[in-house]
Amino acid sequence: MPTAHCTLVMNVLSRWKKIAVLEKLLDGETPLSYVLEKPTSEYTFEAVGKVLDIARGLRKLEGLVLGGIAIVKATAIAWYGSDEHVAGIAYGCNLMARKVIDLHDAPGQLRWQSFTMKDGTACAIKFSVLGTTNENREHLPTNLQIWCPNLTDSLLRWRILTDELFGKHSIVYATLSIDSRTLNFFRIGGWCCAYDLCPPHSVIDLSSMVNTTLWHNGTILHKSINECTLDTIKLLVENGANPLLTDYSGDTALYNTLKFDQPTVTLYLLQMCKEKNFRNENGCSIEEITVGRDKKRLLDVAIECITVRLPTIFYAIC
């Protein structure tokens, strides 16, 4: 059988498994959060940079950039970008890769059949199906729109379409080009996955990695506030760390800079909140978030603390 489809799928699955392992929580920490505890600020900055470089390098594959991935088996679905699904990504990639290896080693010479059809938005979908297919299926119309902003929704639509066309036990590889990126789909042995491949100069998004929720410690940025220098904090924010996400007690990383009386860090995070338009988990901007019993705006409290530089102001609002 031709190896082009399977080779690409194997490479993608292997790479996403490595990404998931790099970002997986172990004893409440990830490799990125662990290096924040290194003994000197210079070492910490260098170590954080190296971990981020490794993560960025893992997202480059064969001259392209990995966007996202989602995997489904029956009703269980895992997607990149959700903390609790990192382990599911690694598990799903591993099992799907094994099935591809078994397929490659299986006796017989089944052939891939290729054809093109259009979805409900007239986007061309290129299919490669292993084994025999009904010759009329390439003319079967569908009103289903495959592409949507949420990759998990696209994956489920792919599954519906391939169920309809080829049956639930089919082995299918398919692609759909949208703007400058390609949405890929693969199904085998009851497992289905969808992943994005983007042009080589695409921006590599590490925000999910740097915003991982640590056990009992909030995000990586929360931990860095009391552990790291401003340079390291800047490095995290430049790679997507969001200062408005909350920890287990409901405090943002920005609010924690007030606790530890770090006006320089507070000022920097305020500037980034405005420049990057950060939002918290509920979609609120810094101008909408309130703190303390008096429900003062976080923005006002931060500016007041920067101006006066007195820790007592923080305790006065609690």
Image (spheres, grey):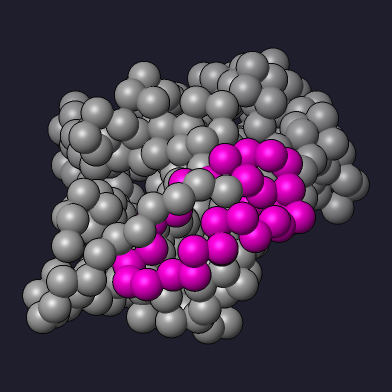
- Asked if residue 132 lies left or right of residue 175, the reply is left
**Percent coordinates x, y for residue 267 in the rendering:** 59, 19
Residue at position x 66%, y 49% in the image: 119
Residue 257, above or below 191: above
From the viewer's side, name the closer residue of 140 and 219.
140
- Asked whether 182 or 66 is in front, the reply is 182
Residue 179 spot, x, y in % from top left? 56, 27
Taking the image as drawn, is residue 310 in sight?
yes
Q: Which residues are magenta?
A: 118-146
| Residue 9 drawn above or below residue 263 | below
Residue 298 in view in this figure: no
Residue at 39 percent of width and 53 percent of height: 114
Quarter residue 192 falls in: bottom left
Left or right of residue 180: residue 140:
right
Looking at the picture, tell me which residue is in the foreground, 200 or 296. Answer: 200
Residue 213, percent across and down? 49, 58
